[in-house]
Each structure stands twice: as C-alpha cells, then as structure tokens.
Amino acid sequence: MIGVSIKTVLKTSLYSFALILYSCSSRIDPDKQNYTGNQQFLREFKQLKESAFSQDVAITGETKAVFNHEDEVAIRVVLPVDEPYSSEFTPQIGSLHTLGDLEQIASDYAASLVIDDRKSAGSLMVSKSRVKNSLMTMISQSKYYLINQFGFDESEIVEMLDVENADESVLVPFVLAIIEHDNSFYLTSIQPGFSLFTPAMAVEWQQVGHCALRAIGADIFFGLGTSMCKTWGKKAIKTAFKTAAKRIVGPVGVAIAVIEFSLCMGGVEL
C-alpha cells in the first residue's frame, strides 16, 4: 500500500510538473543553442545596420519640395552641458545625410539625439518614409526572430502591432531588448568551465547593462522577470511589447533607439 501510495504521489507530481512546463513557453531557459542563435542575429543585425545607415534620409533645401510636410521629422543633436567645441559643431548639422552620420556625430561629441517637435533652427530634417525604408531589412529580421523563437505567425504580429497602434519598426529595438535579456541572463547564470564563452564576455555584458532597455527608455520586462519562466510565451511577449510601443515614436524614434543601442554596446564581443 505504501509503495502504491508513493507511486501515485510521484505520478501526480510528475504530471503537475509537466503542466507547469507546458504552461510556460515551449522555449526553455536561455541555453547554448539560444545564445549562439542570438549572437548570430546580432552579427547579421550589425551588417544590416551598416547598409541601412548608409542611405540618405535627410531633407535638404534641394529636396524639400518633393516631400510631404507630414513626412518631415526634425532631429535635434543635444550636446553635453558646457561642451567646449559647440561653435565648430553647429555648421556640421547641414552636412549630415545618413543615420550613420548621426551615429558618428553622437559618438564624437557624446551628444544625445531627440525628436524636435518644434522643428527648431539647427535641427536636422529627415524623411520619415526614407528612415522607414532604410530600416526594412532589420524589421524583417526582427519579425523572423519572433516567428522562429516564439512561434508567432505574420497575422499575430500584425495584430499585436494594430492593438498598440504601433509602427512595425518598433519590433527592431523590442527584439534587441529580448536578445539582450537572454544573453545577459545566460552569461551570468551558467556554470564556470563552459567552453562557449570567455569570462571577459560575461563581464562585458554586465558592464554594458541594459542598452536596449536604456534606449527604449523603460524596463519593458518589469513584472515578468519574477516568472518561473526565464523566457516567455506569446502572452508575456505581447505584454512587454505594449510597454515598448508606448515609448518609441515611429521609425525615427526607432532609428534613434538603434543608434543609442549601438553606441551603448560599443565593443561588446559578438
């Protein structure tokens, strides 16, 4: 009787544990396969970004007439307080044409990039549609990540975007944040002696902090990190996206977030 009782308890416990696993995601905790896949994503992302950031997105005096007024977005380059070389900085705004130019000047001058709703003098005017077009390959890559890693299909992604009235470009920094979370968790939680990475890599990720979350401007995973699942199913992903979608304004906001993410990541080994 005792043996039968123990067997019954064990069967019940195993069944309950299986239900818990099923109720989480079909994904498991970030492991070697997920980590290497994430690293491959970031390497491909870097290549896509280089191409995207070389495209002309500026609206200049010569091209202004061909753009709809609603397509214009102003980006203001904000220098640090007491910046000593601001006099030589201002004339450079007129020479900026690509997102790569903006990234370079933000890096050179430790400057911040903000959307200027007032379209003040000295701001760089860019075409929202051109910026969106430059991001399309990264948008496609981000969609594929959600499909491959979380089992989304195209219609579910469209629905998620529609519910939040979000531009599809927001998927780019959102997926970067997911990858960053997975990599940070993986490298700081696996046992020493793992041959996949060097200790320096874990230190680099810890030093960087949360670049994508910083670029988005909020901890989009707040409240989800205490879940039993270290990575989440579709419902949790949609909850996190709801927060991200409120923090980023259209393709230009996404471009700024990608620039901030790239500058923050710096020399992290991929």
Image: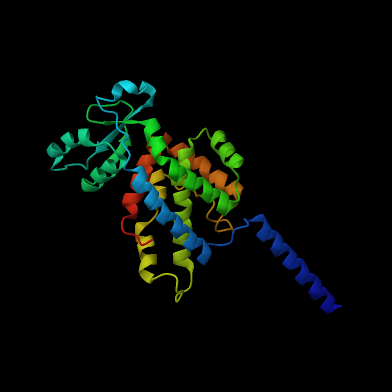
Q: Looking at this view, is 223 or 181 the one in front?
A: 181
Which percent across, then down, holds residue 220?
A: 48, 47
Q: Looking at this view, is 62 or 3 the one in front?
A: 62
Residue at (40% x, 31% y) in the render: 129
Which corner quadrant holds the N terminus? bottom right
> Count the marks: how many?
0
Residue at (39% x, 39% y) in the render: 134
Which corner quadrant holds the C terminus? bottom left
> Relative to 110, is 152 on the left or the right?
right
Relative to residue 172, is residue 42 depicted above or below? below
Residue at (48% x, 62% y) in the render: 35
Residue at (76% x, 71% y) in the render: 10
Relative to residue 72, is residue 11 depicted above or below? below
Q: Is residue 95 visible?
A: yes
Which percent across, then down, holds residue 139?
A: 46, 43
Q: Is residue 217 visible?
A: no
Relative to residue 219, is residue 189 depicted above or below? below
Q: Quadrant of residue 124?
A: top left
Q: Quadrant of residue 25?
A: bottom right
